[in-house]
Amino acid sequence: MRANNRFFRIGKDNDDSMSPTLNQSKHKASLCIKTGISLVLSFLLVIDALAIAYHVDPHAIKNGNGSLASPFNSIQAAQRKVAKVNQNMTEDIVVYLHGGTYYLKRPLLFEEKDSGTNGYSIIYKAYENDVPILHGGENVTGWQQVSGNLYKAPLKRSDKLRTLFVNGKRMRMAGTNEPVNGLGGWGTFEVKGNESWAFGAGTSIDGIQFRTKDIGVLGNAEDVEIIQCNVFTEKIFCVRAAEHIGETTILKLQQPYGAIATNLGWAGKIRHNKPFVVRNAYELLDAPGEFYFNRPTQTLYYYSDGEDLSTAEVIAPLSDGLIQIKGTSTSSRVSNLSFEGITFSYDHWQLMELEGSHAFAGVQSLGLAIKYLPDGNWHPTEYNSTHVPRGTVHVENAARIRLTKNRFVGLSSACAINLVNDVHDSEVNGNFFHDLLGNAVNVGHPQHYKIGDGELYGADAEGLCINNLISNNYIRNVCLDFRQVEGISAFFVADLQIVHNDVAGTPYGAIAMGWWWGNSNIPPSNVAKNNAISFNKAGDTHHALDDGGIIYTLGEQPDTRIEGNYLYHGPRCIYPDDGSAYLTIKRNVVKNRPGNLIWLHLWVDHCHDNLVQDNYVKNNLVMDNGTNTSIQNTRSFIKEDFPEEAQQIIKEAGIQDEFKYLIPDHEPRKVTIYPKTFIDKRHE
């Protein structure tokens, strides 16, 4: 992994082993003073030769020069300065971010000109013990009481508001307090087949019917969302209009995304007569902690949960992501960038968009449908009908990107860090993730089934992600809205290490790697290989969805290992799904509750040539319908404690000592945005 050893050096917290820090400079300078002015001057010359440092402070006045005495007042100003001096680097350039809030109306963009050169890095990092916050929201003030606990405030924006924070706590869109059953589909939407978003001609429904008494008479229907889960998938449909006929209300879907989302096969199918959650309507605003933004009148409403809104901090997310790192092509990458000790908060996402229509059309994991399929079968398209959403930190065509010791909290995107296309030799290490609508980290793309000369999101996706490290990340309260996504996900990847992470409390699985199904009638991909899911601590999963594993794999992945993990409290702990092959599953410890489902789930003969060896389990419940599976030396315990060697595996799994400070004294508070009964009824 460490092709560039100096790039991957990791020091202790607040100890920058990559370049001299200001504290080190002060300490050395004080020693020099004792020996005379000449030595001080010599020391300063040495420091100047070794590193370049700039300072940024959001409280500074404009036109600073980047020194400690006169810092820049924005990251963009520092970025422009760095781009003027980084063409022929002889040491790292450090941009120190002083404490405070850096407000962003749009994401920071880093391109090739922002790269480190000559093998040296540009490091954006927190200054000493400061807490710099990249903040994508806007403060809402001017609250007036409407009646009782209902308040309103002016808010100028053109987009739907999907998230609101009051005194740091995530609130929820006004919605039905219980799931409501649909009454079936309505109308017909015709697809000619020659549209850019279609893989053939066909028809779909154009809306969904409900009892008016269940959802009320809804105004501003163009902002209403309806949500349904089915086994391991989730759909969020956006509405364009409502029509009331007698005792029935028809919610007409935004098109063409409605046609795409309602015409998927398998668990992607819409169940018209099953429960939905309906949300984002003023008429449904009736419970503490709910909000609704009326776009036509530019008015935000909030049903107070007892807060004093004259003094409360109310934040409406605004920026569409926070950082984009984008090279031009596989031959022109952004490289050698590092971000350390930064808090990322309050970004905004409007769901996937197509010709003005929006939806979250789940296929599986972070893979979302983006094209109409007449028969709902996404396999013949070689997954070119599938896309992934952009990340809060979105990376493509890049190498040696390092994100470490950061905090990702209060985010609204479907993915916090997305290493999506042609990302090499990069690292997501030692970060804290909490209170996210989506997952923590994704690597790769479904369209990497083939690697060719085309552009991503079309035939022959161009950029495999190779030789990346996802390690020592603490992940809690993620996938709160986009629940079909695992805490960490990866598609077609090579030489990826997912190691020493701590993931718990997810609505679906904890870690997933791979794509392609053995029953797909297209050949297996030869792209994914030499990956590892090892030494992780993960469990307490599947709170909302089913048919997955704590660790889940898909497709052939030669020389891939699942080793040394401690897994607990999940319905299927290790699940090599259809087409999984050439895996070594070794020395894992699995602790399940009595009566839970199997620890190893090889359910079909398309799973083949896997070695399962030396695992420790509570209750040896196995499904092995695979081909050429070798299960050796499984040690099973029921009432007995695990033996010493298993206890050692448990001890070594999860966050390593250097990053144990990430683990709070108590589990973070639970965050939810759905009615509890929507979870309880998930299997109906």
Image: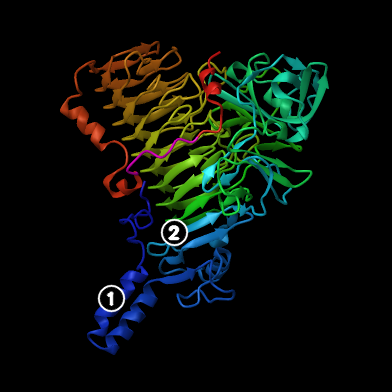
Q: Nearer the viewer, residue 298 or 14?
A: 298
Q: Where in the figure is residue 648, as x and y percent of width and height?
A: 20, 33
Q: Residues within 10 Å of mark 1 (few under 14, many from 20)?
A: some
Vertical position of residue 97 compared to residue 390: above or below: below
In which quadrant is the C terminus drawn? top right
- Above or below, comparing residue 637 to residue 672 in the picture: above
Q: Which residues are magenta?
A: 664-671
Neighbours of disc 2 within 10 Å: few (<14), some (14-19), many (20+): some
Q: Position of residue 365 (x, y in %)?
A: 53, 29
Q: Amino acid at mark 2?
A: Val
Outermost residue on the front side: it is 148
Residue 669 in the image, given as x and y percentages of width and height: 43, 38
At label 1, the amino acid type is Lys
Residue 436 in sight from this viewpoint? yes
Identify the main secondary structure in magenta: loop
Which label was assigned to residue 28? 1
Residue plotted at (61% across, 30% down): 368
* Up-down relation of residue 461 to residue 597 (above or below): below
In the image, is 673 to the left or to the right of 131?
A: right
Q: Residue at x 36, y 53 (%)?
A: 8
Q: CA distance from mark 1 to mark 2?
A: 25 Å
Q: Which residue is mark 2?
A: 131
